[in-house]
Image (cartoon, rainbow, N blue to C red):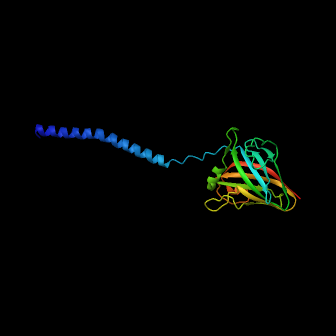
Amino acid sequence: MTQQGQLQTVSFKITIMLKNIYIKPIITLFLFILIFACSKDEDPEPAHEHELITLVTLEVTKVGSSETVKYNFEVEGHDHAHDEDDHDDEDDHDDHEGEHMEIELEANSSYNISMFIYNDSDPNNIENITLEIIEEVDEHQVFYAITDELSGFSIASASDDTKDSSGNPLFIKTTWTTTGETSGDVVGYLIHEPTSKTGSTRTDFGGSTDFEIEFEVHVEE
C-alpha cells in the first residue's frame, strides 16, 4: 500500500472514531430520556388526598312539618351534641360538644334527613365539603348500621338523594321511618372507594372510613 493510501486509511479510521465519540453520547442521552419518560408514565397516580372532616350535621325534618332539628357530630374527638336551631341558622357550628347523642323521633312517622359535612377547624373559615363528596359520588358511600334492638325502624334513600354513575344511591339524603316505640344505636359511616355499594354490614362495603358517627335513636308514641 502506498503512503497516500495509508494516510487515507488512517484518516478514515479517525473520522469513524470521531463520529463514535459524538454519536454514542447522543444515543445514550436519548435512551436515558426514553427510559425516564416510560417510567414516569408508569408511576401510579397520587393517592386521594382526604379533606379534613371535623363536623358532620344531620338535619332532621318530620314529613309534613317545616321544623328542622340539627344534630352536630364532632368527628375528631367523637364528642357529640344536640342543637335544635332552625335550618336557616347556618352559622351555628360550634356547639357540638357532648358525650352521647340521642335523636328523638315519634312513632308511626317519617323523617327526611340531610347530611352535611364540614371542616370547621378554622372557625373563621368553615368549609362545607358536602358538594365535593357529591361530585365524587362514585368514590364514596354513606352507610347507616342499625342495631338489632332498634326494631320497626328503617332508613331508605330519599327521592332527592344523589346517585352514582351506576344508579346506586349515595344515602347522603335519606328517609327514616318509624312504627312503634323502640330505641337502639345507629352508626353512620362515610366510606371512601368502597368495593361494593350494597351490604348489610360495614365490612360488606370494603374501602376505607372517612368518618364514623354514633347516635342512639329513641322512638316514642
Q: Name the residue: 67% across, 39% down.
A: 125
Nearer the observer, 58 or 168: 58
Q: Relative to 78, say whether 194 is above or below.
A: below
The quarter of the image holding the C terminus is bottom right
Q: How many marks?
A: 0
Front residue of this view, candidates 114 and 30 = 114
Residue 107 location, x and y as percent? Answer: 86, 60
Q: Which is more toward the observer, 173 or 46?
A: 173
In the rendered structure, the answer to whether residue 23 lies left or right of residue 120 reads left
x, y percent for residue 40: 47, 46
Residue located farthest toward the right when viewing the structure as drawn? 221
Q: Residue at x 64, y 62 (%)?
A: 167
Quick one: quadrant of the N terminus?
A: top left
Q: Position of residue 155 (x, y in %)?
A: 76, 59
Q: Is 178 on the left-hand or right-hand side of 5?
A: right
| Residue located at (73% from left, 54% from top) | 114
Which residue is found at the position 62% from the left and 53% from the top? 135
Percent coordinates x, y for residue 115 in the rendering:
72, 52
Give above or below for 27 relative to 186: above
* Horizontal relation, residue 152 to residue 16: left or right: right
